Image (tube, rainbow, N blue to C red):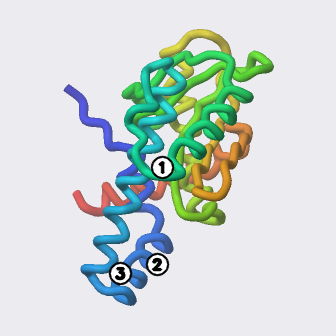
Amino acid sequence: GLYYPSVTTLLKLTDVEGQAALTKWRTAVGEEMSSNITKRAVARGNKWHKFCESYIMGLPVWNSLTEPGDLTYASDLGHFLNTHIRQVVASETRVVSTTYGIAGRVDLCVELMDGRLAVVDFKTGRKPKSGQRVENYGIQTTLYADALQSMVGRGIIDTIVIVQLCPKQLLWQESSTLQWVPLLEERVARFAELVLAKL
């Protein structure tokens, strides 16, 4: 079978600034501290990611919430999702973009309240991300939209949504795939150069 590299690998290898910043941070706080912070962040990310997907699919979610403050946050989150999403088209789906030869796993493809189809990607963090991080999110989700386009067969998917789940605020950031396609193509080209250089 064919091997398709993942979009996360592509983004990691082509985001030189991001990798440099991460290394710098690790060196500054030390290996143990950075490892602990990362573990906590990943645990929180997985927990709320799972909550969102289960909630949207109508699965039981409330009994998994044990910490104080969780229930309030969860009910705010549920309300937040209900105001934006009419129905789920696909959830946790592995996809391949034949346009770019890159694979990934989509959090959600949904029908929005106004009938448009959108790819939704959940991101967690202590505070909202901006700049290069958001650029990476946009590129990643646009690739998913391209890959799903041929699979879903329900009309055009030209909207992406980055949902940032921060403890103090919930952000629904909608944009058009057209905005991100040039950046995606640029990164794919850079990735191809890196791969070829290794051969």
The residue carrying pointer 1 sits among few (fewer than 14), some (14 to 19) or many (20 or more) residues within 10 Å by Cα, namely some
Q: Amino acid at mark 1?
A: Val
Asked which secondary structure carries label 1, the reply is helix
The residue carrying pointer 2 sits among few (fewer than 14), some (14 to 19) or many (20 or more) residues within 10 Å by Cα, namely few
In this view, which residue lies farthest toward the left?
1
At 61% from the left and 39% from the top, the residue drawn is: 77
**Reading the chain from its start, which is encountered first: label 3 or label 2?**
2
The residue that mark 1 highlights is 188
Query: In the picture provided, is 196 more to the left or to the right than 18?
Result: left
User: Where does residue 74 sit, x and y in percent of width and height?
Assistant: 56, 40
**Marks 1 and 3, how far apart in space?**
28 Å
- Looking at the picture, does residue 30 appear above or below residue 41? below
Nearest-to-viewer mark from 2 and 1:
2
At 72% from the left and 29% from the top, the residue drawn is: 84
Q: Which mark is residue 21?
A: 2
User: Where does residue 193 sit, x and y in percent of width and height?
Assistant: 40, 58
